[in-house]
Image (cartoon, rainbow, N blue to C red):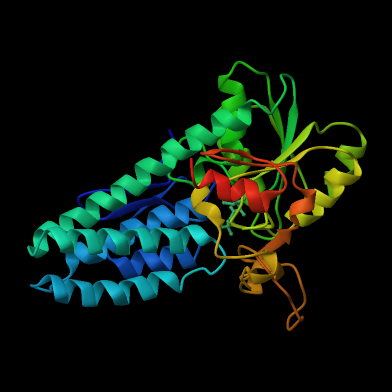
């Protein structure tokens, strides 16, 4: 099993995703600041993985707090939450995990005045968030696997696999794995996903490791392969799903959804319920991260564009809900109208 992020006695251990697929290197992060920086620099990325990492970072920071009372710990913890929350704005799982850790602190405080005990409860909560994520992805993989017919080829964008989550199944790739584990023969077409190349570097690597047949294409080939009848379904992950079903995912996803509609191919979104943000009415309110221009002008050290060129680098786009055939979660499958079906899933 790919271990994206792991709690250890020494600190938070992370697979450095910036180096894949040519180097498999693990980093040991020994403070919450190091974890926050790793999220910002995309050592770890993918909405659920960011949430799990943030929770572990907060647990690490809390366990290292020198405060001798619960009130001191709480003061330090508030600041840590601010630092963690300022790392990446789009993936709601980050804020969901921070809120879950804040809740754990509130509960711990109500049950104990012993600062060591409270710290231990925060570490336990972070580990629980890790375990819950793996379970959620297994569950959505089972639900989603049922929607994919035997012999299908699934097109995916970015990496929504084990590497984008706590490990194991993943979200969009969890659906592929769910179908495979139900005995179906499934192949994947992976968009390379400019500019950070999560599809080429991560999805291709992860599926190869798992011996799931995968063909890599550049993003601008998606329409062509659909027109040739080579795609039976599109399955992508999500960074934030608004209450009306509008979905923020890796830049380029919207383009794929429009193409899928044109070719009458079902377009599915797969994400744990922690990615659904009922406080966000529509895609209009989802903040879109703007990243460093160097991600576009360079590939690693290689310069591709002229010096001083004007660059726009939004990391995500929003796919309107009417292009989405279903939203697959660990609580079940939501169908349009999403403003009703998503809300109902929270009652499951
Ligand atoms: O910028 P990233 O790599 O953190 O982007 C997130 C993603 O990997 C995708 O948008 C993904 O489909 C959603 S997370 C499972």
Q: Residue at point 18% right, 66% down? A: 64
Quadrant housing residue 149: top right
Q: In the drawing, does residue 197 fall left or right of residue 304?
A: left
* Ligand 1: quadrant of the figure: bottom right
Residue 13 locus on image (x, y percent): 33, 51
Q: Position of residue 188 (x, y in %)?
A: 70, 33
- Mark yes or no: residue 46 visible: no
Task: Give the residue at the far bottom of this rendering.
Answer: 308
Locate residue 150 relative to residue 221 in the image: left or right: left
Q: Quadrant of the N terminus?
A: top left
**Vertical order, 239 against 326 (above or below):** below
Looking at the image, how many numbered discs can be counted on the residues?
0
- The residue under the point 13% across, 58% down is 111
Where is residue 24? Give x, y as percent. 46, 45
Tell me the residue at 64%/25% (across/down).
146
> Do we see residue 184 in this rendering?
yes
Q: Is residue 113 above or below residue 327?
A: below
Instruction: Classify residue 308 by image quadrant.
Output: bottom right
In depth, the one of 1 and 283 nearer the eye is 283
275 to the left or right of 32? right
Q: Quadrant of residue 172?
A: top right
Where residue 194 sits: x, y (%)?
71, 57
């Amino acid at each position: 099993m790919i271990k994206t992020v792991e709690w250890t006695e020494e600190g938070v251990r992370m697979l450095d995703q910036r180096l894949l697929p040519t180097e498999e290197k693990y980093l040991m992060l020994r403070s919450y600041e190091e974890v926050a920086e790793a999220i910002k620099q995309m050592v770890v990325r993918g909405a659920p993985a960011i949430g799990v990492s943030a929770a572990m970072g907060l647990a690490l920071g809390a366990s290292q707090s020198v405060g001798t009372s619960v009130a001191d710990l709480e003061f330090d913890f508030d600041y840590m939450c601010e630092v963690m929350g300022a790392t990446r704005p789009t993936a709601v799982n980050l804020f969901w995990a921070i809120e879950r850790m804040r809740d754990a602190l509130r509960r711990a405080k109500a049950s104990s005045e012993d600062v060591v005990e409270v710290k231990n409860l925060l570490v336990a909560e972070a580990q629980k968030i890790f375990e819950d994520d793996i379970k959620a992805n297994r569950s959505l993989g089972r639900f989603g696997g049922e929607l994919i017919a035997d012999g299908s080829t699934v097109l995916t964008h970015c990496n929504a696999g084990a590497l984008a989550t706590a490990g194991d199944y993943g979200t969009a790739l969890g659906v592929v794995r769910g179908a495979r584990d139900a005995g179906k023969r499934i192949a994947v077409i992976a968009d390379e996903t400019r500019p950070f190349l999560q599809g080429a570097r991560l999805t291709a690597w992860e599926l190869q490791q798992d011996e799931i047949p995968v063909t890599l294409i550049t993003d601008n080939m998606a329409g062509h392969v659909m027109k040739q009848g080579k795609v039976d379904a599109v399955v992508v992950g999500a960074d934030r799903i608004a209450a009306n079903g509008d979905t923020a995912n890796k830049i380029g996803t919207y383009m794929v959804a429009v193409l899928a509609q044109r070719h009458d191919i079902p377009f599915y979104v797969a994400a744990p319920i922690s990615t659904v943000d009922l406080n966000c009415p529509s895609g209009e309110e989802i903040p879109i991260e703007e990243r460093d221009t160097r991600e576009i002008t360079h590939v690693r050290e290689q310069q591709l564009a002229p010096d001083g060129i004007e660059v726009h680098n939004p990391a995500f786009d929003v796919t309107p809900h009417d292009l989405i055939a279903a939203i697959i979660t660990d609580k079940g499958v939501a169908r349009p109208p999403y403003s009703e079906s998503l809300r109902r899933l929270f009652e499951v």
